[in-house]
């Protein structure tokens, strides 16, 4: 079992719709959770971080965390063609005071005009 | 510097040769990471440095891979006797080092082994 799992997609949604991206992780002691966006040929960039159960909203993005179910998701409201990218879920496993980050394989999102 | 700097940005090497990839993290960042990303794949953790602690080398795929970090700043990833399966983008990242802190990626070093 992979430590962080995502559906590889591609996930296709029409412009203006809600895109829902899901991620599960295997290590119960995970403390920090991140969503990164990666455009083709570019390096990943951070979109959202979440540390406690519940929802966290930032503009059109909402991250949801359920530690009991070991599940984290990202919702993108009013999806735009510019949101088309690969979305990477990442989990921080507590390591001393550091933050070794384990990534899922990413979900490719395509927003159709 | 303003961001994580990696060099070279592109490297083509012959099978069997050694390569060195360099990473200069953001000033003041104590944590440094190396990841590998093959075409169409996710990020594969390679190694993690945190301050003066022993590095976490658990992701290095074989003994042909090694990394060092001098003076707590610049890091070099060395691949000996390169193989075609080593072809990938090698991404370096850095952070302030506390659990949960944001990590920032460099633009990567694209390695092609022919």
Image: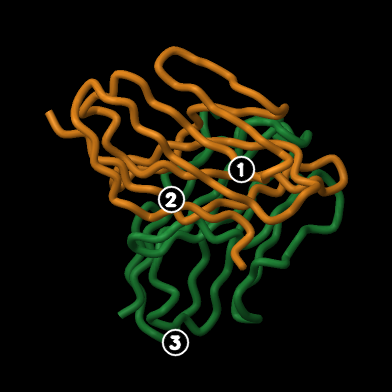
Chain colours: A orange, B green
> On the rendered image, what quadrant is the N terminus of chain B found in?
top right
Image position of A73 with respect to A96: above or below: above
Residue A27's mark?
none
Residue B73 shows in the view = no
Image coordinates for residue A99, horizontal then vertical, percent: 73, 43
Q: Is residue B14 visible?
A: yes
Q: Secondary structure at mark 1?
A: strand
Query: What's the distance in space between the residues labelled 2 and 3, CA to CA?
Result: 31 Å
Labels 3 and 1 in the same subunit: no
Q: Secondary structure at mark 2?
A: loop
* Whether marks 2 and 1 lie on the same chain: yes
Camera-side residue of B28 and A67: A67
Percent across and percent down for residue A42 are 34, 43
Residue at which label 3 appears: B16
Marks 3 and 1 in Cβ contact (< 8 Å):
no
Q: Secondary structure at mark 3?
A: loop
Residue that appears at 57% across and 29% down: A64
Q: Name the residue at the front extreme.
A: A69
Say the numbered circle drawn on residue A106.
2
- Measure how far apart labels 3 and 1 are at the Cα level: 43 Å
Q: Within 10 Å of the Cα at label 2, are there few (<14), some (14-19), or many (20+) other Cα atoms?
A: many
Q: Give the quadrant of residue A60.
A: top left
Judged left or right of residue B61, residue B41 is left
């Amino acid at each position: 079992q992979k430590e962080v799992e995502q559906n590889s997609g591609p996930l296709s949604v029409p412009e203006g719709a809600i895109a829902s991206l899901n991620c599960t992780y295997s290590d119960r002691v995970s403390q920090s959770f991140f969503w990164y966006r990666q455009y083709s040929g570019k390096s990943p960039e951070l979109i959202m971080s979440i540390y406690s159960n519940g929802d966290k909203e930032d503009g059109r993005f909402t991250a949801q965390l359920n530690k009991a179910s070991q599940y984290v998701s990202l919702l993108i409201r009013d999806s735009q063609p510019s949101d088309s990218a690969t979305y990477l879920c990442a989990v921080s496993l507590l390591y001393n005071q550091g933050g070794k980050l384990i990534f899922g394989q990413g979900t490719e999102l395509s927003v159709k005009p | 510097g303003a961001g994580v700097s990696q060099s070279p940005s592109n490297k083509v090497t012959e099978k069997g040769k050694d390569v060195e990839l360099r990473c200069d993290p953001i000033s003041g960042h104590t944590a440094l990471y190396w990841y590998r990303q093959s075409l169409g794949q996710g990020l594969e953790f390679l190694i993690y440095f945190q301050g003066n602690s022993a590095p976490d080398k658990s992701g290095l795929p074989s003994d042909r891979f090694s990394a060092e970090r001098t003076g707590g700043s610049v890091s070099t990833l060395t691949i000996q006797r390169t193989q075609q399966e080593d072809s990938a983008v090698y991404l370096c990242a850095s952070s302030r080092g506390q659990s949960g802190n944001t990590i920032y990626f460099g633009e990567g070093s694209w390695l092609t082994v022919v």
